[in-house]
Amino acid sequence: MITNATSQLNDNSSTPWRRYRGLLPVAVVIVTALLLSLAGDMAQVALQFDRSLIQHGQLWRLLTGHIVHGNLHHAVLNVLGTALMAALFSRTYQFRSWLVIVFASAIAIDVGLWIWMPRLEWYVGLSGVLHGVLAAGAVAWWKTEDRMLAMLLTLIMIGKLTWEQTQGALPLSGELPVVVNAHLYGAIGGLIGAGICWRDVREMKPRALPAKVA
């Protein structure tokens, strides 16, 4: 059955591109975050969540504030978090679903900061959105992974959020003040996005065995 083997080889020829093309948006986010961080205070001031300027019509800051950072250390931490989320969950949802989840997380953070933290004048960073991605990934794992793994991830997420709400930011957060409520709001947005996209969760199928040449 050489024909079957040849067909298998042809089907696999595009596998690397199909496997990694979903990581292209992740790479764009990582490169953009690092470049904006290297641009310094000018980029941060121009794009950060700034309450007074948003009130004067600069609504784009509701989105761009999540991609700029306080300094390079802050950006690197979030870039590492982005890479970890991609490694864990990049194949869990379809691309359009990830857009919904990320947007829901960002908007939930903006609404939360605007309504429940009215004294907060400015905000930067991707970590809140990453918590939304983590929450959505945890939801998906209940469908795609072993229940013990799903339970472990869920407990880690809940434990981290609980610690931050009761004890403050984790020691690895660096010198900048961390708005831990943004993590909570982002996780809530991620759960909402996951609920919207639940039917799009990609259930992992066993890998097909290679065809035998006879």
Image (cartoon, grey):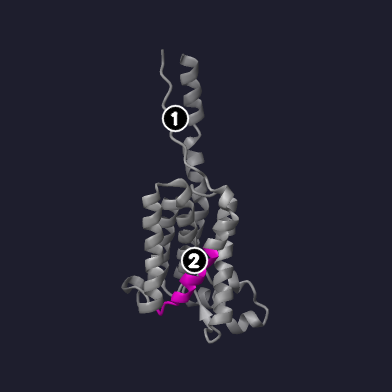
Q: Main secondary structure of the magenta part?
A: helix
Region of the chain picked out in magenta, as a range? 176-190
Q: 10 Å neighbourhood of mark 1: few (<14), some, or many (≥20)?
A: few
User: What is the secondary structure assignment of the residue under circle 1?
Assistant: loop
Q: Check residue 110 for magenta coloring.
A: no
Residue farthest to the left, as pictured: 171
**Picture disc at residue 208:** 1
Q: Check residue 179 for magenta coloring.
A: yes
Kindly identify the amino acid type of the residue bearing the numbered disc 2: Ala
Kindly identify the amino acid type of the residue bearing the numbered disc 1: Ala
Q: Is residue 84 left or right of residue 105?
A: left
Quadrant of residue 77 within the rendered picture: bottom left
**Picture disc at residue 56:** none
Q: Is residue 113 above or below residue 156?
A: below
Q: Is residue 26 left or right of residue 99?
A: left
- Residue 49 % position (x, y): 55, 76
- Residue 69 % position (x, y): 46, 72
- Residue 86 % position (x, y): 45, 53
The residue positioned 54% from the left and 75% from the top of the image is: 48
Q: Is residue 109 above or below residue 134?
A: below
Q: 10 Å neighbourhood of mark 2: few (<14), some, or many (≥20)?
A: many
Residue nearest the observer in this picture, 34 or 26: 26
The residue positioned 62% from the left and 82% from the top of the image is: 53
